[in-house]
Amino acid sequence: MCGMSQQPPVRSTSTRPPARPDASMSLLTNVMDHSLDDGYAEAAARKRAAGGGGMPKTLRARLGLAAGLVLAALVVTVGAAQARVAAPAVAKEREELIDRIDRESDAADELEDAVDKLRDEVDARRRAALKHSGGDGQGELIGILSGATEVHGPGVKLVVNDAKGSGSGEDGDPRGSSGFADTGRVRDRDMQRVVNGLWESGAEAVSINGQRLTALSAIRAAGDAILVDNRPLVPPYTVLAVGDGERLSTRFQNSADGLYLHALQENFGIRTGISVEDDLRLPAAPSVTVRTAQPRTESAQPRTEKGTS
């Protein structure tokens, strides 16, 4: 048996690159290698070739801030200049307006003074006419009864004042259903009853806190205030009545209105005091309205028209 010679293995002369480990992930490899689009890459290259990447952001921010400050300073400067120009005109208009208000106020004061003088003149002439009318002293009597002339003589002085504390409505309330929580205050209807009681008891002239009352006077309420002929009064209310002092005082206290006032004092603590005076002085009414009666004529009779059916 002859032996066969052993030959070395034959090697290929062609060389092949080794396979990549991520050859099976070609899609992910392509995305990672080309993350920037080719168009963006070309634009960035052109920008770098033209000027080296553009202006830094910090510099742009500083330039923008400087431009804003310059614009704000310009606006403030223009506004100040316009204000300086308009200031004299505004001051002049203000002075003219103040002068006009002063002139109008002075004119209104002059007109008010003229009205007061004319009213006083009319009242004086009316009182003079009433005093000299009628003859045999009737004119003077008419002036006294109408409140057109001042009067003085004996009479009574009655002071009515609010209670020191507020009372509550109990049985025997002389006011009835008052509707007021503070029953210790003097009300307008209380003063109405006082004045009417004095007239009924024989008073020839009556005044409240210096306000002369006439046959046409009205005592009303405005909130908690009492008005006499639309003029507010404050307590205590001092009522002066000219007449026969002793007789007037006795008759009033025994009248229904005097007993009413006494009940207010007992039930609600309203303070009252009456005294007889030798000489009282009552002023004339500030304004007197004169009304005269006219006889009724035949022509003034109401006519009755017959209707047709």
Image: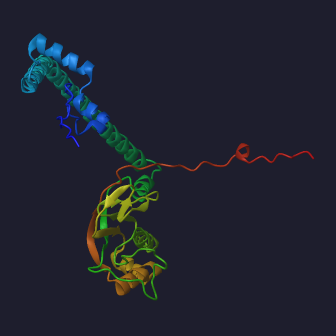
Position of residue 170 measured from the top left corner of the image (x, y, whole percent): 43, 87
Evaluate whether residue 238 shows in this view. Answer: yes
Which of the 4 image quadrants contains residue 9?
Answer: top left
Left or right: residue 194 compared with residue 291: left
Which residue is situated farthest in the front direction here?
Answer: 1
Which residue is situated farthest in the bottom direction here?
Answer: 171
Camera-side residue: 108 or 5? 5
Which of the 4 image quadrants contains residue 22?
Answer: top left
Camera-side residue: 19 or 214? 19
**Colour logic:** rainbow
User: Is residue 192 positioned above or below 25 on the image?
Assistant: below
Position of residue 147 measured from the top left corner of the image (x, y, whole percent): 39, 56
Residue displayed at 39% across by 70% down: 187
Tag count in the figure? 0
User: Is residue 47 positioned above or below 277 on the image?
Assistant: above
Which of the 4 image quadrants contains residue 299?
Answer: top right
User: Is residue 187 positioned above or below 302 on the image?
Assistant: below
Position of residue 19 measured from the top left corner of the image (x, y, whole percent): 23, 35
Camera-side residue: 26 or 56? 26
Camera-side residue: 41 or 287? 41
Position of residue 56 measured from the top left corner of the image (x, y, whole percent): 8, 23
Q: Quadrant of the N terminus?
A: top left
Left or right: residue 120 compared with residue 73: right
Evaluate whether residue 110 shows in this view. Answer: no
Residue displayed at 47% across by 81% down: 256
Which residue is situated farthest in the right direction here?
Answer: 309
